Image (cartoon, helix red, strand yellow):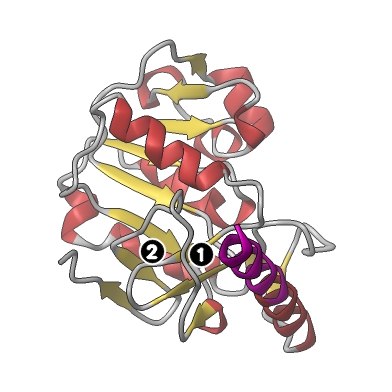
Amino acid sequence: MKDEFKISKTKELMREEIWNTLEKKGFSDSPKPIHGRIPGFKGAENAAALLRNTTEWRISQVIFSSPDSAQIKVREYVLEDGKNLIMATPKLKNGYLLISPRDISGQEKSASTIKGAFKLGKPLQKLPPVDLVVEGSLAVDLSGRRLGKGGGYGDQEIEHLLKENSITSETPIVTTVHEAQIVRKIPREPHDKNINMIVTPQRVLRINRK
């Protein structure tokens, strides 16, 4: 218990440091304030475009995304490319939504937002097979450890997908972040779930799953 408390405090300090760095250096984007959020970041659209050009994206037909603002353009590209989008609702209060490109022709931009997804999407009772997972992150490290805002929702989303057999250990789990959100090492707790791909506005990093 003592070690878990220590790790938790270390994570809290790291969160504050990342939020402060993004704000002070002008790397953050709306909505603001960013403290307490998975932050939007400058260059998020470029990161989404890089992800869109990967093989992992091209061969995917069903893509899962967190509802974070930093991934809005990712979700818009999913729908523009004719792929099915599964979006987690904020804090998982309403489970998951399925947005089908067949149902929203011309409304891809609206459907990529939380408000639009609730209007145009359909509630899911059971998660289907998913080809690619996109999570928002506050920070990541090069071993695949991910730091969220502290609610544990990203870890829960990945856990749900695994339990439903919607994904396997081979499924790409990617996050789009600013370069300043890549840190040396994030402390790990038992419930933490790793990612295996990082996309910034400048580059694509694939993480050795072994």
Q: Nearer the viewer, residue 103 or 40?
A: 40
Magenta segment, which residues?
1-13
**Secondary structure state at the residue bearing disc 1:** helix
Q: Is residue 137 above or below residue 102?
A: below
Image quadrant occupied by the N terminus: bottom right
Q: Which residue is mark 1?
A: 45
Type of secondary structure dominating the magenta stretch:
helix
Question: Which residue is at the front of the view, 66 or 140?
Answer: 140
Please tell me whether residue 64 belongs to the stretch shown in magenta. Answer: no
Residue in view at x 56 percent, y 83 percent: 180
What amino acid type should be assigned to the residue bearing mark 2? Answer: Ala
> How far across and down, in percent of the image, does residue 163 sit?
31, 28
Q: Residue at x 75, y 61 (%)?
A: 30
Q: Which mark is residue 113?
A: none
Q: Is residue 189 left or right of residue 70?
A: left
Q: Work out how far the residue at label 2 is from the one at label 1, CA to CA, in angstroms.
A: 6 Å
Residue 120 pos. (x, y %):
56, 20
Q: Position of residue 204 (x, y in %)?
A: 30, 74
Q: Which mark is residue 49?
A: 2
| Residue 124, quarter of the rendered image | top left
